[in-house]
Image (cartoon, helix red, strand yellow):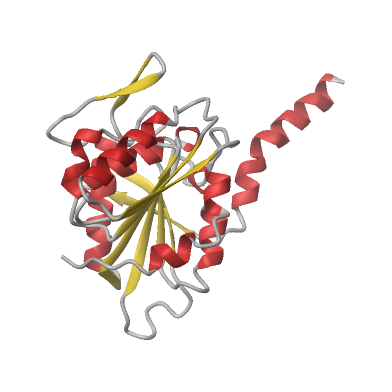
Amino acid sequence: MKPYLFVVLVSAAFLPALAQSDLPYEARYFVNSAGDSLPFRILFPEGYGESGQDYPLLLFLHGAGERGQDNAAQLAHGARTIADSISRYPAVVVFPQCKKEGYWAEIERTGEGFSYILRERPNPNLALVMGLLDQLAATEAIDTNRLYLGGLSMGGFGTFELLARRPRTFAAAFPICGGGLPLLAPLYAPHVAMWIFHGAQDQVVPVAESREVYEALKQAGANVKYTEYPEARHNSWDNAFAEPGLFSWLFSQRKTD
């Protein structure tokens, strides 16, 4: 029985990679001037490069469970749903992958919540994402008035931090089961339309993380809405990606300043 069990376990370990292998995202690497590299997957809409038009860009930050260097695991959640939406809302879609021991935002767990570490410069993983975004905006057919940002769990924290560091870059953002420092909300509140998602029963990231930044954004006059799923746990991204109005809302947003 042991050899058979070993085969089952090995096969199970490869299921996520196999499930992602049929997704139409191209594997690429971004390398900055210091030689640091960032794996990412990119999806172009049908007819890209033929019409001469510029397209929106959606950048999505994955969670902690999808970190690594395989340039595949980051497609585990949301990539298929987003790819399916591109036929209705043509856009360039980018999924970067964070290093195995890295984070998009510098946070520490403190009891039931998190504390935020504020530094003048972003951590290396987020800095690479910012460099990638700048390169794509400069070299691809991108409508810079229609840049969108999303993320789940660790990527939800990264979404809020990237908005604070680039408050005038994105037209809209949708963080899922993440959190942000309420003190920073006024930096990006006037500039970005937001839709925040969280599960009320989240056992990993307390729902208070999203509630608090939502309240701070409202007080700062943001164009923000918040959806909380009463029965959902940490995988509230399943609920969020099933929202029938998510992509129509997202791709209707445009920078006005």
Q: How many marks?
A: 0
User: Of all residues shown, which one is farthest toward the left?
Assistant: 120
Whole-percent x, y for residue 222 in the image: 25, 52
Up-down relation of residue 218 to residue 200 (above or below): below
Considering every residue shown, the one lying at the far top of the view is 111
Instruction: Please state the horizontal and vertical placement of residue 154, each as a whole percent of the image.
Output: 40, 35
Q: Residue at x 51, y 74 (%)?
A: 88
Snapshot quadrant of residue 13: top right
Q: Is residue 180 visible?
A: yes
Vertical arrangement, residue 14 with respect to residue 254, above or below: above
Please identify the quadrant where the C terminus is shown: bottom left
- In percent of width and height, residue 107 lies at 31, 26
State left or right for residue 73 relative to residue 168: right
Task: Tell me what residue is drawn at x 83 percent, y 27 percent.
Answer: 4
Q: What residue occupies the far bottom of the structure in this picture?
A: 51
Given the current orientation, which residue lies at the most extreme front position?
A: 219
